[in-house]
Amino acid sequence: QVQLVESGGGLVQPGGSLRLSCVVAGNIFSLNDMAWYRQTPGKERDRVAYITTQHNATYTDSVKGRFTISRDDAKKTLYLQMDNLKPEDTAVYYCGVPKYPDFWGHGTQVTVSS
């Protein structure tokens, strides 16, 4: 099956930056749109960024102007550059394939705190 491995999370102060990566195993990466999601305990998993196979990106309003999603098709890797982080960005971040919602990685923890 499809395997996704997220990395790059950590503890940062408000206003700091992180870059998340997601390596997608298999042969589907270049053929599908990709997305980043985040989830906090007791809350639904929300999509924060989306990128098409043509590298067209969209974002949820709360991260617009602060987060940048990108993809390297040769490396089968999805990225999320996170700048000007806020405490409310604290969550576990997951990458996913919108067409295949049953496939998830283990996520990477992002904690924004002073």
Image (cartoon, rainbow, N blue to C red):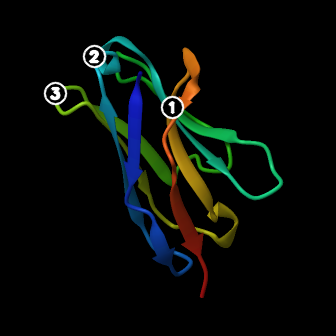
| Left/right of residue 71 with respect to residue 112 in the rendered view | left
Residue placed furthest toward the bottom: 114
What's under tag 2, amino acid-wise?
Asn
- The x and y percentages for residue 71 are 31, 33
Check residue 27 in the rendering and tell me which mark sits there, or answer none. Answer: 2
Secondary structure at numbered mark 3: loop
| Left/right of residue 111 with respect to residue 78 in the rendered view | right
Q: CA distance from mark 1 to mark 2?
A: 14 Å
User: Which residue is label 3 attached to?
Assistant: 74
Label 2: how many Cα within 10 Å (few below 14, some 14–19, many 20+): few
Residue placed furthest toward the left: 74
Circles 1 and 3, Cβ within 8 Å, touching? The answer is: no
- The x and y percentages for residue 64 are 58, 46
Q: Residue at (49%, 50%) from the top-left corner?
A: 67
Q: Quadrant of the C terminus?
A: bottom right
What's under tag 1, amino acid-wise?
Gly
Q: Earlier in the sequence, mark 1 or mark 2?
A: 2
Secondary structure at numbered mark 1: strand
Circles 3 and 2, Cβ within 8 Å, touching? The answer is: no
Q: Earlier in the sequence, mark 1 or mark 3?
A: 3
In this view, the residue in front, 21 or 81, is 21
Q: Residue at (41%, 21%) from the top-left corner?
A: 1
Secondary structure at numbered mark 2: loop
**Looking at the image, residue 74 lies above or below residue 86:** above
Check residue 96 in the rendering and tell me which mark sits there, or answer none. Answer: 1
| Left/right of residue 27 with respect to residue 114 in the rendered view | left
